[in-house]
Amino acid sequence: MIDRTFADAAAHVADGRIPGATLGIVSADGTRSVRVAGLAQRVPVEEPLTRDHWFDLASVSKVIATTRFVLQLAEEGRIDLDRPLTDAIPDLRQYDMAGAAERRLTFRDCLLHRTFLPAVEPIYTYGDDPARLRAFVLQRVWRQGPPVYSDINFILLGIAIERIIGAGLDALPLGPGLSWGPPPGPTVATEHCQWRGRVLVGEVHDENCFAMGGRTGHAGLFGTVDGVLDFALGLLDGSGASAAMLAAIRTPVEGHRTPVEGHRTAGWEIRFPGWSGGQACSAGTIGHTGFTGTGLWIDFERGVAWTLLTNRVHPTRHFDSGIFELRPATGDAVVVGFDAESGL
């Protein structure tokens, strides 16, 4: 089945639209299949991609790490999701304690991307000291707008986690095959970064995350295909999440829609017309993508999850890699193939 489901990704590699791709599929009984094609690095030298290579997961960090840890802290009673972030970050906009809108944002607001914060900000252009940049994020008067998917939401959640545990995000357990960079093994190249002046290998692609120390709530996590599949299996079979956490990540918020008319759960997206996971999956399928060309989707009803990991930004993001067509096509192929093999 996986050979058929990998056909589109293999074609993208063969056509030179992406250097390399890895597809992993796991079912709730632990059965998994993996296919790999192409290059981990194209320039300045070619390096074949293998199953053991680590990928910069980019925004998939938001669900594998930040969302999980925020929900765990809530279960432990260390935070209340409906309380303001100031419970953990009392100095947020500390020079305007009475009027600052940022001081009224809750943990849940940030998890659901229902804040007024912008999608992204070039924080790295304001300096290169991680502590100073965190202070900048906390004291900045953010421009306000309609709710959008926002990196700033998860940067704030990452800072809140650090304050609560009294340590960096790398102090929290991740499991084999997942690591904050630099990862402990061969790593897929991402972009030739104009700001850093080099091809990025083993260092986070996201500029803001890099400038803030490489470990933030919105990016910085690296993973192998098996590390990502292990995480997905823990959600499928319940071994890696409590019932409360599963309910939070699987339940859409009533009446809340994203700008692309899709639904959100705590940290994740849930299937909507035109989303990245395709339309063949169950209505309750959740997923998340990463800018570098990564993604993870979990169909709980069928008991199957898949991850498509690519280096579509190598050596540049300014190229039509076809990733926005490849992801849903792959998702549809995975589900159709799984149904055929399962007799559904």
Image: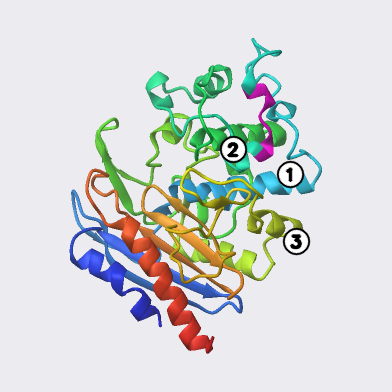
- In the rendered image, residue 183, in percent from the top left (x then y), is placed at 45, 50
When the figure is inspected, residue 339 is found, relative to residue 100, above or below; the finding is: below
- In the rendered image, residue 204, in percent from the top left (x then y), is placed at 40, 42
Left or right: 182 with respect to 37? Answer: right
When the figure is inspected, residue 52 is found, relative to residue 161, above or below; the finding is: below
Left or right: 19 with respect to 181? Answer: left
Q: Name the residue under label 3.
A: 243
Query: Outermost residue toward the front?
Result: 255
* Residue 331 vs residue 71, the one in the foreground: 331
Could you tell me which residue is drawn at 72 percent across and 49 percent down? 72
107 in the magenta segment: yes
CA distance for labels 3 and 1: 15 Å
Mark 2: secondary structure = loop
CA distance for labels 1 and 2: 21 Å
Given the image, on which type of amino acid does mark 2 rest? Arg
Q: Mark 2 points at which residue?
A: 114
Quadrant, the N terminus: bottom left
Could you tell me which residue is drawn at 45 percent across and 67 percent down? 279
